[in-house]
């Protein structure tokens, strides 16, 4: 039991995993490489013999070195794969819950929040954490969970996400909506708080994660987040890999109080929480151009 008051079994029982295929794939390969390394250990001498027999130019010493080196590499690979599988499972369950608590704690006052948005809500860990905080603070606010996977008929359904809200006892605080994060279906200056958990980096991945086109799509998402935030509203984004891009873009958009958390390893890469506030007087200066991130008139 951790400081958040739940262990991984409780979290998994309610939310399951968004991507169970990856840790399963890693685990299967870890078991395979483990078996292979044990095979090399048990049958070391016969392997050396057959290596020398089928490749005559290899002497006894080199044959033993080759077999020993191959066995060592398979054993190390098995350990790395077991670690990767464990990290993916931990990141998908316990760490997601822990980081949701930290994201919520980054917002100073929930009692005055009337409208909150969880961008990329998935199975609802962060969504329900926000709802629990609204309930705890006595707010009459609501949180909207938006996930494009529902629009594409992939990933968890709205009903399954709402089911988790029911299990948490916060169904009256939660609504779910399908939509494109690059063209958020909300009016300007609508939300008091916008949060997101390891989602923004997935936008534009069809162009290749390191391509300029993918980066442009991620920046569109940040532009939309800023657009729908009320002046004085707070944004908190936990994500992997591209955090430096987010900070730069938020600075270009004149956001205030931009903060970056310490590094946390998630899904075998570094991750950070970025928090910021939209200025109370947010306007376009004489040397700036306001972009319409929705591109409504292009079609």
Image: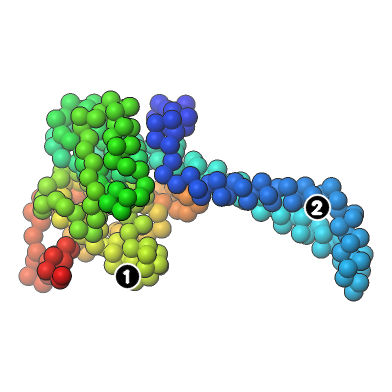
Q: Is 171 on the left or on the right of 243, as rendered?
A: left
Q: Is 211 on the left or on the right of 289, as rendered?
A: right
Mark 2: few/some/many CA within 10 Å (<14, 14-19, 20+): many
Q: Where on the picture, by quarter, is residue 10?
A: top left
In this view, which residue lies farthest toward the front? 153
Where is residue 143? Give x, y as percent: 21, 38
Q: Residue 251, can we see it?
A: no
Where is residue 262? Give x, y as percent: 40, 48
Please give the name of the residue rendered at 22% of the width and 35% of the height, measured from the top-left corner: 174
Q: Quadrant where the C terminus lies?
A: bottom left
Is mark 2 in CB contact (under 8 Å) with mark 1?
no
Gap between marks 2 and 1 measured at Cα: 47 Å
Q: Is residue 30 above or below residue 287?
A: above
Q: Residue 206, can we see it?
A: yes
Q: Where on the picture, by quarter, is residue 216?
A: bottom left
Q: Is residue 263 above or below residue 139?
A: below
Residue picked out by circle 1: 213
Residue picked out by circle 2: 40
Please give the name of the residue rendered at 20% of the width and 29% of the height, measured from the top-left corner: 172
Please give the name of the residue rendered at 90% of the width and 66% of the height, measured from the top-left corner: 52
> Which numbered disc, 2 or 1, marks the residue that appears first in the sequence?
2
Give the number of marks. Answer: 2
Where is residue 208? Give x, y as percent: 40, 67
Q: Where on the picture, by quarter, is residue 4?
A: top left
Towards the viewer: 235 or 67: 67
Mark 2 residue element: helix
Where is residue 102? Give x, y as percent: 34, 39
Please give the name of the residue rendered at 33% of the width and 63% of the height, measured from the top-left corner: 204
**Of the numbered discs in the image, which one, if any, rests on residue 223?**
none
């Amino acid at each position: 039991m951790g400081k958040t008051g739940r262990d991984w079994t409780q979290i998994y029982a309610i939310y399951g995993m968004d991507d169970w295929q990856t840790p399963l794939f890693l685990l299967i390969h870890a078991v395979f490489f483990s078996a292979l390394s044990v095979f090399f250990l048990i049958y070391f001498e016969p392997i050396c013999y057959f290596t020398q027999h089928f490749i005559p130019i290899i002497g006894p010493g080199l044959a033993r070195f080759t077999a020993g080196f191959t066995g060592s590499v398979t054993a190390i690979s098995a350990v790395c794969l077991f670690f990767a599988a464990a990290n993916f499972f931990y990141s998908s369950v316990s760490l997601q819950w822990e980081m949701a608590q930290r994201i919520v704690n980054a917002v100073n006052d929930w009692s005055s929040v009337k409208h909150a948005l969880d961008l990329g809500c998935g199975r609802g860990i962060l969504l329900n954490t926000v709802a629990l905080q609204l309930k705890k603070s006595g707010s009459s606010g609501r949180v909207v969970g938006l996930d494009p996977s529902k629009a594409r008929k992939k990933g968890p359904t709205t009903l399954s996400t709402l089911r988790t809200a029911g299990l948490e006892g916060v169904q009256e605080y939660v609504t779910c909506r399908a939509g494109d994060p690059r063209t958020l279906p909300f009016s300007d200056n609508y939300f008091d708080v916008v949060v997101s958990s390891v989602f923004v980096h997935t936008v534009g991945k069809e162009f290749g994660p390191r391509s300029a086109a993918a980066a442009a799509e991620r920046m569109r998402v940040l532009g939309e987040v800023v657009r729908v935030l009320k002046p004085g509203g707070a944004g908190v984004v936990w994500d992997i890999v591209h955090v430096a891009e987010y900070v730069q873009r938020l600075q270009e958009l004149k956001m205030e109080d931009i903060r970056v958390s310490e590094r946390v390893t998630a899904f075998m890469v570094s991750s950070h929480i970025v928090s910021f506030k939209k200025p109370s007087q947010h306007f376009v200066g004489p040397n700036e151009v306001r972009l319409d991130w929705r591109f409504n008139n292009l079609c």
